[in-house]
Image (spheres, rainbow, N blue to C red):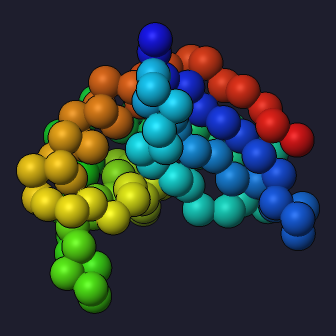
Amino acid sequence: MAGWYELTKTESGNFRFVLKAGNAQTILTSETYDSKSAAENGIASVQTNSPLAERYEEKTSSSGQPYFTLKAGNHQVIGTSQMYSSVEACRSGIESVKANGPSSNIKENF
């Protein structure tokens, strides 16, 4: 099963999306957006940028766990991964976002 985006509305009325892999695991989380259309633009940016290796930045959290961010062409972060147990697992997460990011399947959950 292919991945999909889940678009939700927060309690404060903002919007956020997550990218899910085919197994329903969240593999990328967006920032919050003021409007649904801004969140949809964020999804479109992930769809465009996720296949491009140069758009990923591997990082290490203050607790020493690896994670990554996905950036747009203007270097703005458009999504952040979960924390991983190893660099190898983090890199597998990047590959999953590359594979699932181009999905056009968007599920609204609000």
The residue closer to the viewer here, 29 or 1, is: 1
Give x and y (percent) for residue 1: 46, 11
Q: Quadrant of the C terminus?
A: top right
Picture layout, residue 81 above or below residue 6: below
Q: How many marks?
A: 0
Please identify the residue farthest to the top as the structure is shown: 1
Picture residue at 67% right of the left edge, 62% below the top: 32
Picture layout, residue 96 above or below residue 38: above
Picture residue at 9% right of the left edge, 50% below the top: 88
The reply to whether residue 75 is visible in this rendering is: no
Left or right, 41 with reference to 19: right
Give x and y (percent) for residue 61: 28, 79
Picture residue at 55% right of the left edge, 55% below the top: 30
Please identify the residue farthest to the bottom as the structure is shown: 62
Left or right, 70 with reference to 36: left
Give x and y (percent) for residue 99: 31, 24
Picture layout, residue 108 above or below residue 87: above
Give x and y (percent) for residue 104: 56, 18
Left or right, 59 with reference to 96: left
Please identify the residue farthest to the left as the structure is shown: 88
The residue closer to the viewer here, 48 or 3, is: 3
The reply to whether residue 17 is visible in this rendering is: yes
Picture layout, residue 106 above or below residue 89: above
